[in-house]
Image (spheres, rainbow, N blue to C red):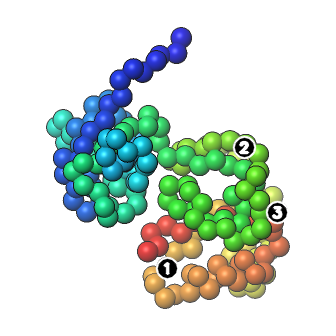
Amino acid sequence: MNELRLLRCQAHPLRLSGSIIEASLSGVKVGEICEIRPHWLDKNTVAKAQVLGFNRDRALLSLIGNARGLSREAVLSPTGAGLSVTLNDSLLGTVLDPSGKIVERLSDQTENAHHSAIQPIDTPPPSYLDRESIQQPFITGIKAIDGLLTCGIGQRIGIFAAAGCGKTSLMHMLIEQADVDVFVIGLIGQG
């Protein structure tokens, strides 16, 4: 039997320091997303925050987005869910922000693709027993990689180096040379 929630826990921020918000929110869980509205009468969501932890009776949240314009009158409303992204063909040729929202469309792909699945962003990787073994080489078109550091189809590739070492140039060469249908590129820690 489904529960009907008659009361909704909401709170004003007690403290906002940089991108960390403290609020008296009971019943929230680590990883849960809260929507932030400018005022309790306003229904427009202006930002989101994710629960990071707790300090006594207060929840500590990390602001997703900009704090500009937030005040003590802002209202935090728990959603009961974590960050997720809708997976379908409309994601092809797009740039996503950390919350999974499309911020730029780089191709002519239509946005009318059918909904296929909602995937939580923070999920554990599949078990190594469930992954297919690498059977075929992945030809990158870059002689140094293909000759010395051969990659396989289905393999994950990490490119790590200090700033100015050519990571972006290498990714550009991979995109230009490799014979594939889809590239999935994650920029972690890029400003």
Density class for disc 2 (Cα within 10 Å; few <14, some 14-19, many ≥20) is: few
The percent position of residue 66, horizontal first and vertical second, equals: 37, 63
- Asked if residue 130 lies left or right of residue 25, the reply is right
The percent position of residue 30, horizontal first and vertical second, equals: 36, 40
Q: Is residue 84 visible?
A: yes
Image quarter of the C terminus: bottom left
- Name the residue nearer the viewer: 122 or 116: 116
Q: Are marks 1 and 2 in contact (CB under 8 Å)?
A: no
The percent position of residue 101, horizontal first and vertical second, equals: 56, 57
In 3D space, how far apart are the residues under numbered discs 1 and 2 (Cα atoms)? Answer: 37 Å
Is residue 140 shown above or below 135? below
Residue wearing tag 1: 161
Which amino acid type is shown beneath numbered disc 2?
His
- Name the residue nearer the viewer: 34 or 37: 37
Camera-side mark, 1 or 3: 1
Q: Is residue 50 visible?
A: no
Density class for disc 3 (Cα within 10 Å; few <14, some 14-19, many ≥20) is: few
The percent position of residue 138, horizontal first and vertical second, equals: 78, 69
In the image, which disc is placed on residue 115?
2
Q: Earlier in the sequence, mark 1 or mark 2?
A: 2
Helix, strand or loop at mark 2: loop
Residue wearing tag 3: 136
**Residue found 32% across the figure and 41% down from its top:** 40
